[in-house]
Amino acid sequence: MKTMRCVLAAYAFLTAVGTGANFVATPLYDDGSTGYPVWSVLNWFMAAGVLLALTASLIWKVRLHRAGADGAVLKHCIEVNVTFYASLLLALWFFWNWFGDLMSREAPLMWAFIDPLFVLVLGAVGLRLWRDPDGAG
């Protein structure tokens, strides 16, 4: 299980770094006339990352709820809740805009919000998975 969590953490880090780097570099190499082929491929990896973040943060939130508010440290409680709700917001925005993109009805400006949020959320989830490979939550 420890190995699987480390692999998932590495996946989260790599997709966050790749998304952040491509977000910054896209204006330098693509003027939009090509239809952004790098993003067309990267979005599939991002979709898996969004599902990873949502699943992991939901598991952490359920564990926190089962432990009860009495045993939870305030910092841990805030961290779990912010991660969960940020992951939920990311999932809603990402899949809404991505499905719109697949059907040629996207809102291009939304990617300016989705991509940085993706980097933050997947970076945080990856860091937590990496630091806690034993699954204590």
Image (cartoon, helix red, strand yellow):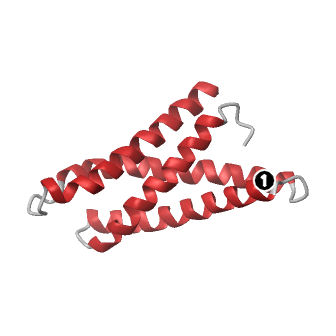
In the current view of this chain or complex, which residue is farthest to the top? 3
Q: Is mark 1 on a helix, strand or loop?
A: helix
Q: Is residue 107 visible?
A: no
Q: What residue type is labelled 1?
A: Leu
Q: Specify few, some or many for label 1: CA neighbours under 10 Å numbering under 14, 14-19, or 20 or more.
A: some
Q: Is residue 136 visible?
A: yes
16 shown above or below 107 = above
Residue 120 in percent (x, y) is at: 48, 55
Left or right for 72, reference 112? right
Residue at the spot 11% in from the left edge and 62% down from the top edge:
31
Which quadrant: the N terminus? top right
Residue 129 in percent (x, y) is at: 60, 39
Residue at the spot 89% in from the left edge and 52% down from the top edge:
71
15 shown above or below 39 = above
Q: Nearer the viewer, residue 3 or 31?
A: 31
Q: Quadrant for residue 27, please give it.
A: bottom left
- Write down the residue under mark 1: 64
Residue 81 in percent (x, y) is at: 68, 61
103 shown above or below 79 = below
Residue 5 in percent (x, y) is at: 59, 33
Q: Quadrant for residue 6, please give it.
A: top right
Left or right for 58, reference 119? right
Residue at the spot 65% in from the left edge and 32% down from the top edge:
133
74 shown above or below 97 = above
